[in-house]
Amino acid sequence: MSRRVYRHLCARFTLVHLLGIRLTGTSVNPARFIGPALLQMIGGDFTAISRIWIFIVGPILGALAAALLYRFLDGKKNAGE
């Protein structure tokens, strides 16, 4: 991974943590979300556990998007050779 890409990823993750957690209380770590959600579910509140789907669907959609983008960019690179 190039230094430019690494810096870009670090900046994005930093922004997600600094802005997302303070503004919305978001949790970008599934373990930090699932544990409290399970405890809330035991207590009778199913609100948090009903949002667990994002930790399953999100990575799958992200992987698909990355694979498609890679194929698109790789196809352009091979066409130019």
Image (spheres, grey):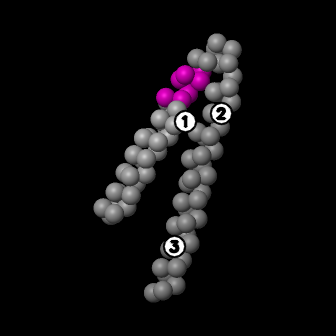
Residue 37 colored magenta? yes
Relative height, residue 57 to residue 22 (above, below): below
Numbered disc 3: secondary structure: helix
- Residue at label 3? 73
Estimate the x, y position of residue 80 in percent, counting from the top left.
48, 86
Quadrant housing the C terminus: bottom left
Left of 49 or right of it: where is 28? left
Q: Which residue is under mark 1?
A: 24
Disc 3 vs disc 2: which is toward the camera? 2
Q: Residues within 10 Å of mark 2 (few under 14, many from 20)?
A: few
User: Which residue is at 48% across, 79% downward?
Assistant: 77
Report the residue at 49% width, 30% height from top: 31
Q: Quadrant of residue 38?
A: top right
* Residue shown at the point (63%, 44%) measured from the top left: 57
Q: Main secondary structure of the magenta part?
A: helix
**Depth check, front residue: 10 or 58:** 10
Question: Mark 2 highlights which residue?
Answer: 51
